Amino acid sequence: MMKKLYILGIALLTGLSINAQNILVINDNDNITQNTDTFLAALQGSDYSTYTYFNAIDSNQMPSSTYLQDFDVVIYYASTDGIGLNLWDNGQAGNTALKGFLTDGGRAWIIGTDLFYAGGYTNPETFLSTDFTYEYMGLTSYNVQSYGDDGNVGLPQVDLNSNVTANFPDSLIWTFSTVWWADGVTVRNEGTAIYNMGPSSYTLAGETAMTHYHDFATNVMGTYFDPALINTDQKRIDFINASLNYFIDFDLGINKNNTVENLIKVYPSPANSYITIESSFAKKQNYQILNIAGKEMLSGNLNTNINTISISALSSGIYFVKAGNTVKKIIIE
């Protein structure tokens, strides 16, 4: 995990390319296997063509915590496979190693139709606060499925949510006239609905089919349709580029003008009794130290360019130092 923090720090301070991410693709699809080949071909044609491949089908398990710690981004791909997914090997609490990866600062893009059915959910269903879907994916409910809830029509397209300003394709259509078993969900208030079911004349129009949830404990993007079914090779590549650009830009704190707000430095990390906060703010600024759940543990004022803060009252663990719109992660031992 220290390697991840080091890479992130270098990226923020020197403008390292956002493509320099250690990406792991976990394939958990043994239904229509050519969809995996199609998705991987699009990924190889994208700006993120360098990745490590893990076959959860052949391994009959998800990768271990030790294996995951060398990666920055996990792409979990289940295609249209709605049976026996390894993501749910611990029931609706979700895979333990993946949760640890997210808690330690990793990012996961979870992709698949029939994903929630595979987790034992029946729509409509409200997720529990202890469910992986709620706690890590940032979803409150599983609402509908195309084909099953639209009179056996299927989903004609998805449309970009009007509140999303990132550079995604406006609409996506398929190699077929419609797709079946795409899931519609509700994202928590803190999250983002990226794509909705469409067009406006479609029975389930407006249901959310792609989400992003990011807080101090998790960073997950969910796509509840299969990108392998997007209608052309180039459009699949464009969608993957847009999705990963958005996902990684967001996590690195890069705004829409690609400038980085990096107005504090925090060290050392790991820390024991004290941390130093170097501030570049033009005016006096408050700071907060938050635990991994986002709860404020300490706060105060940054009175000078160099501020020494006692952290002796804090237990060991991962914390976040926030000042203005800048957030830095630290480890306290």
Image (cartoon, rainbow, N blue to C red):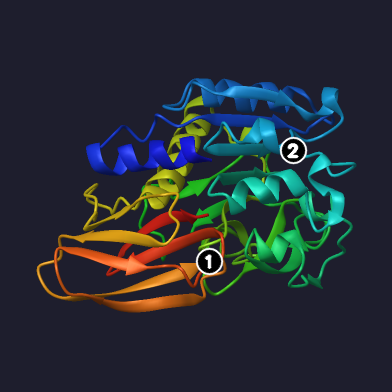
Mark 2 vs 1, N-terminal side: 2
Judge from the rendering whether residue 171 lies leftward or rightward of residue 151; answer left or right: left
Q: Quadrant of residue 280?
A: bottom left
Q: Secondary structure at mark 2?
A: loop
Judge from the rendering whether residue 53 lies leftward or rightward of residue 331; answer left or right: right
Can residue 157 be seen at all in this image of the molecule?
A: no
Q: Secondary structure at mark 1?
A: loop
Q: Residue at image x 87%, y 64%?
A: 122
Where is residue 324 drawn, in percent x and y? 27, 70
Q: Residue at image x 83%, y 49%?
A: 88
Along the line of sight, which residue is nearer the eye, 242 or 24? Answer: 24
Asked if the residues shown at circle 2 and circle 1 are in contact, with their CB atoms under 8 angstroms apart, the answer is no
Q: Amino acid at mark 2?
A: Ala
Judge from the rendering whether residue 40 lies leftward or rightward of residue 16; answer left or right: right
Q: CA distance from mark 2 to mark 1?
A: 22 Å
Q: Is residue 228 above or below residue 220?
A: above
Label 2: which residue? 78
Q: Residue at image x 79%, y 30%?
A: 56
Along the line of sight, which residue is nearer the eye, 246 or 4? Answer: 4
Q: Is residue 198 above or below residue 175?
A: below
Along the line of sight, which residue is nearer the eye, 175 or 93? Answer: 93
Q: Residues within 10 Å of mark 1 (few under 14, many from 20)?
A: some
Q: Residue at image x 39%, y 41%?
A: 8
Q: Amino acid at mark 1?
A: Gly
Label 1: which residue? 191
Where is residue 258 drawn, in percent x and y? 24, 47
Along the line of sight, which residue is nearer the eye, 273 or 306? Answer: 273
Q: Is residue 215 above or below residue 227?
A: below
Where is residue 18 drawn, in percent x and y? 36, 36
